[in-house]
Structure formats: C-alpha cells, structure tokens
Image: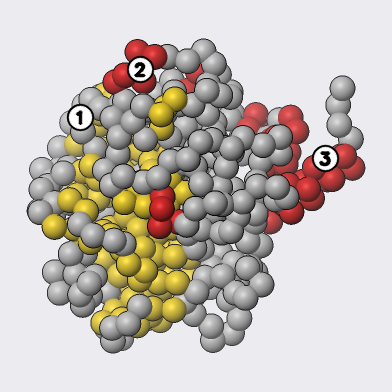
Amino acid sequence: MHMSRLALTVVLAASVAACGESSKLQVADGTGPSPKLPEPNKTLIPTVNIAPAVGWPQGAKPKAAPGTQVKAFAEGLNHPRWLYVLPNGDVLVAETNAPPKPDDTKGIRGWVMEKVMGRAGAAVPSPNRIVLLRDKDGDGVAETHEVFLQNLNSPFGMALVGQNLYVADTDKILRFNYTPGATHLDSDAQTVTDLPAGTINHHWTKNIIASRDGKKLYATVGSNSNVAENGLDNEQGRAAIWEVDLATGQKRLFASGLRNPNGLAWEPTSGKLWTAVNERDEIGSDLVPDYITSVKDGAFYGWPFSYYGQHVDVRVEPGNPDMVQKAIAPDFAVGPHTASLGLAFAQPGQLPAPFDKGAFIGQHGSWNRKPHSGYKVLFVPFADGMPSGQPVDLLTGFLNDKEEAMGRPVGVVGDNKGGLLVADDVGNKVWRVTRQ
C-alpha cells in the first residue's frame, strides 16, 4: 500500500522532531583510538535533526581558536566543495553537487531523504565547474576569480602531476594539459579510467591524490547505500579506494570496506596514505563514529557487514562472517555523524601549537544525531606518524543560536603560504585561517 504525499509529510515532520531518540553519550566519547560503541538503537523512524541552511549574515564569520584568526579568502562562490592548491599558489575550487541519480530517491525513504538534504542545503543544482582563485597582492584575499574548467560532471578531486591536471568527475578520471599560470584550460579532456557511478550513485563524490613519484593516483569511491539496502550487486567496486596506474589507466582495489571515504592526504612523517571516512547511519545518535585512518594495501575495513573492526551490523542480509573476520579497525574516531570530509596535514610553520603537527578535518555536520555533531574544523594532533592526544577545535561557530547552519565546512587544504583554506558550501565562501 502506497503512502500519500500528505502522510509522507507527516512522517518527515515527525522524523525532523526526532522524538524518542537522542544521544546518551558525548561526541568526545565517540572520539579517539578506542571510541565507546553502545548497543545499536534502531528506531522505526530514523533520527532526523537538520540544521537548516541559512547562510552567513553580513560581516559574520566562524570562530577561530586562540592564537589563530580567520577571514574570507573568497566569497560569492557557487556551492564550493573541494580545494586544490597549484604550485604557483593559485587555488582551484570544485563548485559541485550531486549528479542526477533517479534511482536513489525511490520509495518512502528516498523521498524523505531528498527533502532532508534539500533543507540542509545539499539539493542545489551542480555548477559542474572548477574555478580558479588568485591572490595577486598576497593580502590573503583572492582578487582573481575565473572559470577554469566547465561542463564537467559533478567534479570533486583534483591532482596535478607534471603538466597534467587530473580531475575526478563522479563517473571517471579526466586528464587535461595544464600550462603554469593559466587561468582557464582549453584542452580537451582525456579519460584515464572510469569509476563506479550509475543511476543510484548514492555517495557520488570521487576524490583523488597522486603518489609521491607521480606514477599512480588513488581514488575514493563511496558506497551506493547506507548499509547495502540497495543490494550487494550495486556495491561492486564501491566503498573503496582504487589505485590507478597513470601510464596504462589500469586500476586495482587498494582497500575496501570504507563506507564513504573522502579526504586523502599523505602523512608527512610516515609517508602513509590517510583517509577521512563517513560511517553508517540510522542505528542511533551515538553510532557509528566517523574516522580517519591510515590505509593499508589490501585491507578490509568492515562495511557493510561490520563496523569498527568486527562489530556486526545485523541489518545486512545475508551477513558474511568470513569478511567480518577480515575486518580491521580504523586508527582514530572523530565523533558519530560528524560527516568528516576534508583532510589535510599541517604544513611546517603554518599555525601555532597545538595546531603545528597533526591533521585538520573538515566536518560537514550531522543530520542523524540529536544534538548536532560536527559543523567545525577539527584538529587531531600527531606524533611519530600517529594520532596523539585529544582533538582540538580549530574553527567553530558554523551554527547560530537557532541551530541553523550559516556555513558547513567541507574541503581543507594548506595554501603553502602559512594559511589553511576551508571550503564552505552553504556559506559559498572559502575561509583562510592563519596565525593571529
């Protein structure tokens, strides 16, 4: 029997109210190398606690941690999600959003989630382009704002190797010839390799990073569902990081069981690849913590069959005990439902202690937790190549006193000039954090 749209609206309203389920733990309890993992709390209606997107009032900005300051590097952007800094200091910004995915919004759950994401500011049409920002006079504000590439397909990750600029669209990796100093590219795109996409394409963002020797790219591909409710057949090649050989375009699975990996960065001491991962939803406000982790070649991180190592998710049918036994736990939790996306390691001399050695994490913010979590840039201190100590907030104040989202941080990147850049896709700005 089909629900009417009126009944669905009632369901949505009830879920937004988030009655009957809220966090029993603090975000800090779901943070660190051994987070607390209570029993799952699956409710008939998932907790939906949205911070409606409202944008920044005139003159308002996030709150920077003591010893640091923040100002707008660029304003008036169109849903800026991801950032890449070129060797000459130019900043590339992927202005992007989800592609059409008609089979991801079918049924009651799909319709409700479509409305939820719209209220959170995530349903605007994709600009499908990359813009270039240039700070000519070195004052920390970009004067040049040019369309660098357009007519893309939900672009996200970017990487420069020699004279080749690689862009990860939602369905493939493209290669363009790049001339240093260019403010736009006219060259035709060459396809390096296809990436899993299709008409569901639930987690659509695809990020890339080049190996130190420039011979390979590593590409993230998120899952096609929350916990395989669309069927395991639709998860082929997804919830994974791929290794792509640039000479041949051949690729292989590098690591799997990563529900929605986004940020990629090389840890400067160990040289290991790290990623930021969004974990699963709809089993309570306290589960499951998102995380950052080093990425081990050939490792399986549990999704969808288990989380945080071998904690079985009973919603997945059929289960797979053999795969659960192979699942390894990630290195460091960064709070449940924080939507941790951006990842960048501190650059020498960039910010003062305690922000001088460790990882910056752009936390886009929760929808499935009461009270809210994320909506900040978090810093995890590192020592000897691994997390060391409690995280510290670098940038907060993205929610107003009505719990509305004035901004939502996404990509983070060092600008090689002593600043950390933060893409804000609700505020339509790029923020720059520096020493005070």
CA–CA distance between discs 2 and 3? Answer: 37 Å
Q: Is residue 220 left or right of residue 102?
A: left
Query: Residue 315: x percent and y percent?
Result: 56, 24
Report helix, strand or loop for mark 3: helix
Q: Earlier in the sequence, mark 3 or mark 1?
A: 3
Q: Which residue is mark 1?
A: 297
- Note whether residue 292 is visible: no
Q: 34 or 183, which lies in front?
A: 34
**Residue drawn 66% across the image and 62% down it:** 52
Q: Considering depth in this image, is 208 or 15 the residue closer to the camera?
A: 15
Q: Earlier in the sequence, mark 2 or mark 3?
A: 3
Q: Determine crowd level at label 3: few under 14, some 14-19, many 20+ residues with C-alpha closer than 10 A.
A: some
Q: Which circle marks residue 323 in the picture?
A: 2
Where residue 295 sits, quadrant-wise, is: top left
Alpha carbons under labels 3 and 1: distance apart: 44 Å
User: How far across and how far down the image is residue 233, in percent?
Assistant: 50, 16
68 left or right, relative to 128? left
Of the numbered discs in the image, which one, if any, rests on residue 32?
Answer: none
Sequence-first tag of 1 and 2:
1
Query: In the rendered image, is residue 36 in sight?
Result: yes
Mark-to-mark CA distance, 1 and 2: 16 Å
Q: Residue at x 54, y 51 (%)?
A: 24
- The residue at the point 82 percent across, 40 percent down is 8
Figure check: 219 above or below 341: above
Instruction: Give the amino acid type for the residue marked by disc 3 in the picture.
Output: Leu
Amino acid type at image mark 1: Asp
Residue 178 x %, y %: 26, 53
Pointer 3: what residue?
8
